[in-house]
Image (cartoon, rainbow, N blue to C red):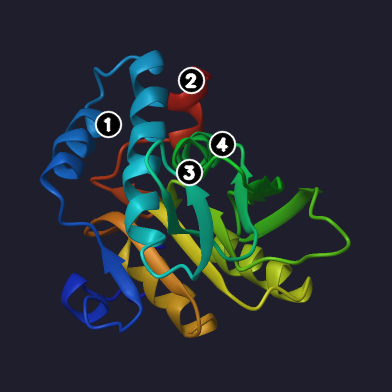
Amino acid sequence: MQGIPQPGRTEVLQLPRVHISRHPVMAHKMTLLRNKETPTSQFYRLVKEIGSLIAYEATAGLALREKTIETPLEQMQGYKLAGGIGITPILRAGLGLAEGFREVLHDVQIWHLGLRRDERTLQALEYYNRLPHKVDLQICYAVDPMLATGGSAIDAVNILKAKGIKRISFVCIIAAPYGLLKLSEAHPDIDIYIAALDERLNDQGYIVPGLGDAGDRQFGTF
């Protein structure tokens, strides 16, 4: 990222479809997650827990339809989610976040998408795609812990749109202003949910202060 201008936090905070968590429990768990002393087992558990917390916020606008049920006392009108929900974790780091969403939503479709970053060009390269041929969903959430340069996120949303998915949200734990702006410019029609907005990218394209490599820290492959 050396020599490439980066937007500041103030600039991206004005983006209309960016949602940053302000929950105190999230702030507490984020501090534990960032700590370099946090062991792998706790790190993975925290990613799942943060995924569940973000899921509550990211699903607030989902459509419902009425459902008649029987309580132990009488019949009543309740609600159920209208239409299917898809979760697309960007491998491998997105797996923990996807599990967090699954804890909240249970009956979801999980489609794995493999994108890796070319460390020389910082561009995303697709190496695995398990998206179905036919899609019938209310919404699909693309999930990846880190939104750095935005390359993987933009490509993931491109792939989902090519499948005919009309409503897409992107969910991450930490975003850099640069990647957040790039994703918003490339896909102004999607909502973006993040747990924390960091300061910048370093010369190697990593988010600082960040938390290191989210995939390595989840799976102990340092």
- Find residue 142 and report its image quarter: bottom right
Asked if one can make out residue 7 in the rendered structure from this viewpoint, the answer is yes
Q: Residue at label 1?
A: 33
Of labels 1 and 3, the one closer to you: 3
Asked if one can make out residue 174 in the rendered structure from this viewpoint, the answer is no
Q: Secondary structure at mark 2?
A: loop
Q: CA distance from mark 4 to mark 3?
A: 10 Å
Q: CA distance from mark 2 to mark 1?
A: 16 Å
Q: CA distance from mark 1 to mark 4?
A: 16 Å
Of labels 2 and 1, the one closer to you: 1
Upstream in sequence: badge 1 or badge 3: 1
Of labels 2 and 4, the one closer to you: 4
Q: Residue at label 4?
A: 95
Check the picture and name the quadrant holding the N terminus.
bottom left
Q: Residue at label 2?
A: 222
- Find residue 134 and report its image quarter: bottom right
Q: Residue at x 41, y 33 (%)?
A: 48
Upstream in sequence: badge 4 or badge 3: 4
Residue farthest to the front, as pictured: 74
Upstream in sequence: badge 2 or badge 4: 4
Of labels 4 and 3, the one closer to you: 3
Q: Residue at label 3?
A: 101
Q: Which residue type does callout 2 highlight?
A: Phe
Upstream in sequence: badge 1 or badge 4: 1
The vertical placement of 42 against 52, above or below, is: above
Q: Secondary structure at mark 1?
A: helix
* Residues marked 3 and 2 touching at CB (< 8 Å): no
Q: Secondary structure at mark 3?
A: helix
Q: CA distance from mark 1 to mark 3?
A: 18 Å
What number of labels is visible?
A: 4
Upstream in sequence: badge 2 or badge 1: 1
Q: Which residue type does callout 1 highlight?
A: Leu
